[in-house]
Amino acid sequence: MSKLISTTVAVAALTGALLSTNSHAAEGSITFSGTVVASTCTADVNGQGPDGNVRLETVSWDALQNVGDTAGDTPFSITLAGCNFGEDGDLTIRPKFEQTNVSQLTGNLQNVSGGMGTTDVEIQILNNDQQPIDLRTNANNNPILTDESVVFDYYGRYIRAADGGEVFGDVGSVLMFSVEYQ
């Protein structure tokens, strides 16, 4: 008899559990939408193709005495051409800077030159208005609405990011980017 009661209780519990999961009403819904374009843009950095080099000028360590000091503003550009902007032409684009080599403390490019490199100097990227771009979030890296090729003008420069290490030596980094449609 106790075995029959145990089995009956187990079946009743299982039935109740199954019925309770089916009795919940939907609380909301999520709709996904997006656009797939036929092709992406071709990128050109300073007329060198998609992988360009920007040589910062040599500066004296005297120009970088204090944390936050900057020197050596050097212009460079990224041209995006052959972009597909959809039927309406209402997409904006921009080079989206990736997180590779980016300091999570400052949003600048870390010095990855190794060897005799300075430990306190980073490379800061600026937009065309010479406002610093926070590479962690791409803040101040503004997209452009266009249906043609577009040139994005930027600057790179040295910035004293820390205190207590070497200020002089080699400085180098790599800024990775992709094309972002919005």
Image (spheres, rainbow, N blue to C red):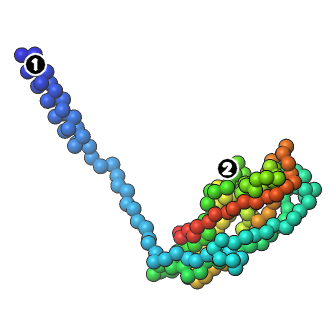
Q: At which x and y percent is residue 127?
A: 72, 68
Q: Could you tell whether 146 is left or right of 164 in the image?
A: left
Q: Count all numbered tags in the image, as a single digit.
A: 2
Between 153 and 74, the one nearer to me in the picture: 74
Between 127 and 97, the one nearer to me in the picture: 97
Q: Judging from the image, what secondary structure is the residue with disc 2 in? A: loop
Mark drawn on residue 3:
1
Residue 120 higher or lower than 182, as above or below? above
Q: Could you tell whether 29 is left or right of 128 in the image?
A: left
Which quadrant, please, contains the N terminus?
top left
Residue type highlighted by circle 1: Lys
User: Which residue is rendered at x = 45% and y = 81% of the image?
Assistant: 87
User: Which residue is rendered at x = 22% and y = 34% of the image?
Assistant: 17
Q: At which x and y percent is residue 105?
A: 70, 48
Quick one: label 1 or label 2, which is nearer the N terminus? 1
User: Which residue is rendered at x = 58% and y = 67% of the image?
Assistant: 178
Disc 1 to disc 2, how far (Cα)? Answer: 64 Å
Q: At which x and y percent is residue 79?
A: 65, 77
Question: Looking at the image, do the residues carrying marks 1 and 2 touch, with CB atoms under 8 Å apart?
Answer: no
Residue found farthest to the left = 1
Mark drawn on residue 104:
2
Residue type highlighted by circle 2: Gln
**Is residue 130 visible to us here?**
no
Residue found farthest to the front = 115
Task: Categorize mark 2 by other alpha carbons within 10 Å: few (<14), some (14-19), many (20+).
Answer: few
Residue 138 higher or lower than 164, as above or below? below
Q: Quadrant of residue 136?
A: bottom right
Residue 95 higher or lower than 27, as above or below? below
Task: Categorize mark 1 by other alpha carbons within 10 Å: few (<14), some (14-19), many (20+).
Answer: few
